[in-house]
Image (cartoon, rainbow, N blue to C red):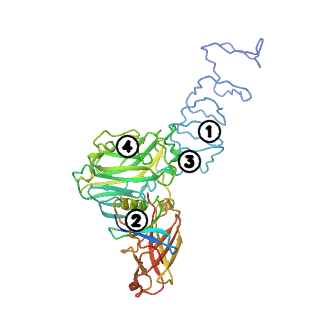
Amino acid sequence: MSKLEVDKIDPQSGTDLELGSSGDTITIPSGATLDASNATTTLPANVVTTDGTQTLTNKTIAAGSNTVTGLTNSNLSGSAAISNANLANSSITINDTAVSLGGSTSISTGGMYKNIIINGDMSIAQRGTSVSSITTSSYNTLDRFKLTIGSAGTWTQSQSTDVPSGQGFAKSLKMDCTTANASLSSGAYFFLEQQIEGQNLQYLKKGTANAESLTLSFWVKSNKTGTYIAELRDTDNDRAISKSYTISSASTWEKKTITYDGDTSGAFTNDNNTSLRLQFHLGAGSSYQSGTLQTSWGARTQADEVVGQVNLADSTSNEWYVTGVQLEAGTASDFEFLPYDVNLNRCYRYFQKLSVVLMNFNTTGLLGFVFPVEMRANPSVSRAYVGNPNRMYNVGTAATADVVSPTTIVSKQTIRYWYAFSPSAWATSTRSGWETEYTLDSEL
Amino acid sequence: MISTVEKKYDSENNFVCYNIVTTNNLHISVPLDEANKDYQAIQEWIADGGTVIDNGGGE
């Protein structure tokens, strides 16, 4: 091998200098340094490292159509920055103590309150933790979840501590059949639902070309295996879409994820009334399942809504649990756990109980107070002293008195309440320390 | 399920709310708000032939 020892190589003429020819390998030995720090360097189309351990530090990948692959399980530390990047189909974890969102940064999915469903973790049960003998439609235990039922057996609904292991949930909603109906009439219906205000759904852009798809995630468990239907109903435009899921293993928690296309027809009305209903069907008569399941958005056709649904009401052995209900725009993400107080305050918009103590009042008078959270609409008001909705209780003497035909004026945030007591009850009382509980209901 | 419905008036004889009694003896004051589900239920009950008790104001 010949050896050339010079201090500098310059072009013979012009400014171009070429080393070697195509196919040659030019080697810089280990320990040598190739210093191009002050030069402008054009890299080849493919930069190949020799063993995958090389580090690229303090470099900027300039804007353009550059594609960087293989950044999995990477540590971007120090002053590293990602700008104008498309990080698609990725699960990104940020484990840092401070994350700054600069400029016009926005988070389109995965942001706060991404879950359209309120109380999806089944943690709030203001009305009580168990209600039995249910045969008609009503809100029973878990806030915001309504059981809509007609001619489909008798049920106990409760807040249960039976939850999927290791998922962070503490409570679930349980349906327990106490009187079976193994042969549902044609018009029978039976579903758990949550109704959602239209003004909370405008960002879905329903009824436009940019309508967002929706993904429903939940954990479910039942001894009754088979096909179940989860339906979305647009009540503003009477449109619907239904998707089936299968409970495969008896009495085993299973996570289900269902995606619904965006609907380019029928915008949601921007007000405080029901626009969307999420319905977990548990049984249905032939009137609701004699057609073909409607798996795309379209005008609601009763016969196509619940096709294939098993009858959960066919045995008193049947139970059905659900928790971790999340409905969100776009693709599925982890369940959004909210602090208990935040969850409770969101429920207060639809239902509240207020304990009131009256001091030194007369047989007739006016009572007024302000609600801690503004309600969805002017609420219905009932009194709910234990065991007797009409009754007030004297703290000092344990005497009771009945309120007779009150007049109530409410707004979304206040109540004025003219009361009068039954004279016979009043005669047994003293004029101090009466308490009662008011139930304020503005559910959808 | 609604059992009875009564109109209620304030001291100036303005009709301000309904008082209803349900079949399971719940006593509920219902505001005159079309967005209230109990108000909607009263309207359906009236449409189905229910008769509202109206003793007027006059306090």
Q: Are marks 4 and 2 in contact (CB under 8 Å)?
A: no
Labels 4 and 1: the sequence-earlier one: 1
Measured Cα–Cα span from mark 1 to mark 2: 49 Å
Residue A343 lies, in percent from the top left, at 48, 59
Q: Nearer the viewer, mark 3 or mark 1?
A: 1
Labels 4 and 3: the sequence-earlier one: 3
**Residue beneath label 2, please?**
A127
Measured Cα–Cα span from mark 3 to mark 1: 16 Å
Measured Cα–Cα span from mark 4 to mark 1: 46 Å
Measured Cα–Cα span from mark 4 to mark 2: 33 Å
Residue type, label 1: Ile
**Residue beneath label 4, please?**
A300
Please give the chain letter of the residue carrying mark 4.
A
Residue type, label 4: Arg
Measured Cα–Cα span from mark 2 to mark 3: 40 Å
Are marks 4 and 3 in one subunit? yes
Is residue A25 shown to the viewer in this render? yes
Left or right of A254, for residue A114 = right
Residue at left 26%, top 57%? A153
Q: Which mark is residue A95?
A: 3
Measured Cα–Cα span from mark 4 to mark 3: 46 Å
Is residue A139 shown to the viewer in this render? no
